[in-house]
Image: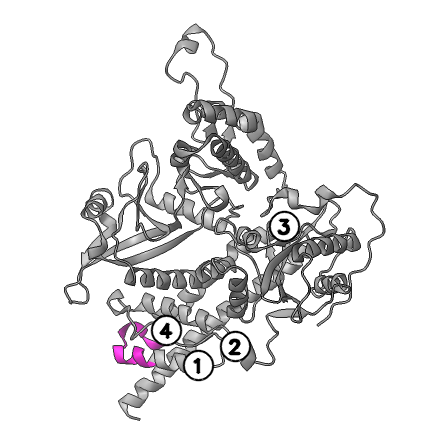
Amino acid sequence: MFPQQLDDNRAFDIACAMLEGFNRHYQRFREASADARTRFERSDWHGQHEAQRERLAFFPRRVEETVERLRRDFHAGALPMAVWQQVKLHYIGLLTGHRQPELAETFFNSVTTKILHRDYFHNDFIFVRPAVSTEYIENDEPQVRPSFRAWYPSRETLREALAQLVGSFGLQGRWADLERDLDDVHAETEAAIGPDRLRTNFQIQALSSLFFRNKGAYVVGRIINGYNDLPFALPILKDEQDRLGIDAALFGEDDLQRLFSFARADFMVDMEVPSAFVQFLRALMPRKPRSELYSQLGLHKQGKTLFYRDFQFHLRHSSDRFRIAPGIKGMVMLVFDLPSYPYVFKVIKDRFPAQKDTTREQVKGKYLLVKQHDRVGRMADTLEFSNVAFPRARFSEALIEEIRREAPSQLEISDRDGDGQEEVILKHVYIERRMVPLNIYLQEATPEQLEHAVIEYGQAIKDLVAANIFPGDMLWKNFGVVRNNKVVFYDYDEIEYITDCNFRRVPVPRNEEDEMSGEIWYSVGPKDVFPETFGPFLLGHPGVREAFMRHHADLLDAAFWQAHQARIRAGHVHDVFPYDPERRFLHRRRPVEPAVPPSPPVPTE
């Protein structure tokens, strides 16, 4: 056999091994996502949280396994570059008819870049852009379950269609009062549609898998009437008697945007063709980037891939320069941004002030904790990148000097292509949605805006407490304001679990000298927290203090924190709703003695 034929055979075997690695990954991913249904039916909330955390590790584990196999069986690190070019071509051929080609391409990139030096991170060896289309995969695979179902009711049969829709998921368990729930959903749907005539194409479409997160299962779909598309979601929860119930009916893009917020944990959804789900969701939320939708479906690596492609596209079509981000500089993170781009870039500094008793690895651990935790709509998601290359010409001199001064170990400037175009390479970067820092927002706020922001700030802390998170540094500058004036926390280097903290009251002074002393005269442990001391740091502004004490004075009382700590330690999982609690049906119902629950409707195809 000729050497060229040997290389081609080896390249084909490598491509097959890489695709086998991806297929193992996605099979495990689907199994974990499908098991979310069983955990929901069993009310296994702690198991649901643990499964979400574990699923984050699936992708890197399969990548490492595949890299190890290629090095062991094919001596991949020593192969000529011509072989790698053939590997990519064979891999493209193997993806013909594949149901997750875009994810498989990203897996290929992750494996390849761990084996090859970064000088080879270009189009000859990786998928800089997609090579296989994800359009209409379901059309080519008749045995694949359609990503969504459709019903075509009249006004008279609308409630019946809604019953068939809910029944089509076949959830196991006892309903508290399904007929009452369907009456409420029907009334809300009629109100959302309005008095307009139902057009010839009137239909209800719903994605064929439920979306599971925390203690909820969500039906996601849309109502089509003429030229109008109305997104909707139906949250299904369990009550205190472990009975199923539809909790609310959410309509419109804004409601769906909140449900799929970047500040919330991702969903567990069983998807054979994930691109079809993303396409459907993008029709409901056209303003939301595809990268965020993939991440919200638990496909974080694909989300990062699409984010980076979008970022490169933006750089290509813009000319402004990166700069030091406005606002108060942090002691741990160096933050910069591109004014025309809605994200900030955060680099861990090489040295921290004495009051910051932490290390680079500890800071990375805090960000990983947030990634693995339920963010309850109050902690921004971050994208973590290594060896990110930026055009040197797009960096201001002030920013370059700031990086050299604060994080020199993370900076490299090179002309790796030898074309005279220097690049800034940052070895480790977090990328996060840009927000208006709350301290800046308060300076410019009207009295009404100020009160709303203070209410939101306190509620953000209480939502974090419900999720077992103590923010640590609660200064206004560590919180940001996003769409709909919602307040989100984004500085994670001092966060702790509530259950790891020791919330104390300041001891009574022993004598007059203690009372007059400017120094702390009582012992303080490393995890001790004194909530009553928050006030002097947070409430200097009279308007802020008045609003805070009116709505959130309990945050200054150690008893508030201790009570939540005790409930969490007892195993209680708090409810934090991704919609206004006033939208819940139970707020509109008179309490009644529950009747014998009816059987769910028969599922329909």
Viewer-proximal residue, 412 or 433? 433
Residue at x 31% of width, y 53% of height: 428
The residue type indicated by label 4 comes to: Leu
Distance from label 4 to label 2 (Cα)? 30 Å
Whether 268 is drawn above or below 501: the answer is below
Majority secondary structure in the magenta region: helix
2 or 1: tag closer to the N-terminus: 1
Disc with the residue nearer the chain's start (3 vs 1): 1
Quarter of the view holding residue 7: bottom left
Mark 4 secondary-structure assignment: helix
Q: Magenta span covers which residues?
A: 70-86
Q: Earlier in the sequence, mark 2 or mark 3?
A: 2
Q: Residue at x 32, y 81 (%)?
A: 86
How is the rendered protein coloured? one colour
Name of the residue lying farthest toward the top? 512
Tell me if 604 is positioned left or right of 288 in this view: right
- Rendered view: 44 above or below 328: below
Q: Which residue is mark 1?
A: 94
Q: CA distance from mark 3 to mark 1?
A: 39 Å
Disc 1 to disc 4, C-alpha distance: 18 Å
Nearest the viewer among 258 and 9 is 258
Q: Which residue is mark 4?
A: 70
Q: Is residue 161 visible in this depiction of the protein?
A: yes
Residue 110 painted magenta: no
Question: Would residue 60 be seen by someone viewing this image from the given angle?
Answer: no
For label 3, the residue is 215
Amino acid beneath label 3: Lys
Q: Residue at x 18, y 48 (%)?
A: 397
